[in-house]
Amino acid sequence: MPKIMPITVLRDTNEISDTCHKLDEPIFITKNGHGDMVVMSIEAYEREFAMVEIYRKLAIAEKQLANGEGEDAETVFAELRAKYGY
């Protein structure tokens, strides 16, 4: 369940920082009862950004495969084994 907090918690920066690190997930901040922003620790941000990058690269790879680009895995691995002697 996502953590939702009012914007007034931002007055206590230590509390919000501790909460971000304790939960290790984004905290949704509301203003006047509506979603306004998201706060998270650097570690959570880096983890989320890494996942976005993985999905972006997978989307590119799927598009390349749909366009007939690239090689199948067996061919690539055979070439690597021949090159590096595995």
Image (tube, helix red, strand yellow):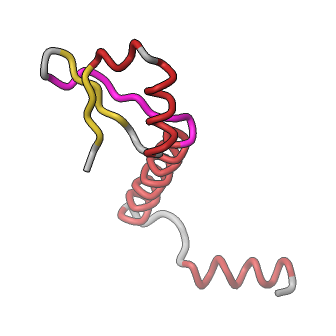
x then y, percent, for residue 66: 36, 64
**Viewer-side residue, 20 vs 56:** 20
Q: Please name the residue shown 40% across and 62% down the image.
A: 62
Query: Which stretch did the figure color magenta?
Result: 34-43
x then y, percent, for residue 6: 25, 22
Q: Is residue 64 above or below residue 6?
A: below
**Viewer-side residue, 21 vs 82:** 21
Which quadrant of the structure image shows residue 81?
bottom right
Q: Is residue 38 above or below residue 10?
A: below
Residue found at the far top of this picture: 11
x then y, percent, for residue 70: 53, 66
Number of numbered discs on residues: 0
**Viewer-side residue, 52 vs 57:** 52
Q: Please name the residue shown 38% across and 17% down the image.
A: 10
Q: Please name the residue shown 45% across and 58% down the image.
A: 58
Point out the image quarter for the C terminus: bottom right
Query: Overall secondary structure of the magenta stretch?
Result: strand
Q: Is residue 61 above or below residue 41?
A: below
Q: Please name the residue shown 59% across and 85% down the image.
A: 74
Residue found at the far right of this picture: 85
Looking at the image, residue 83 sits to the left or right of residue 61; the answer is right
**Viewer-side residue, 77 vs 36:** 36
x then y, percent, for residue 63: 38, 57
Residue 12 lies within the magenta run: no
Residue found at the far left of this picture: 33
Which quadrant of the structure image shows residue 2?
top left
Residue 41 lies within the magenta run: yes
Q: Is residue 83 above or below residue 22?
A: below
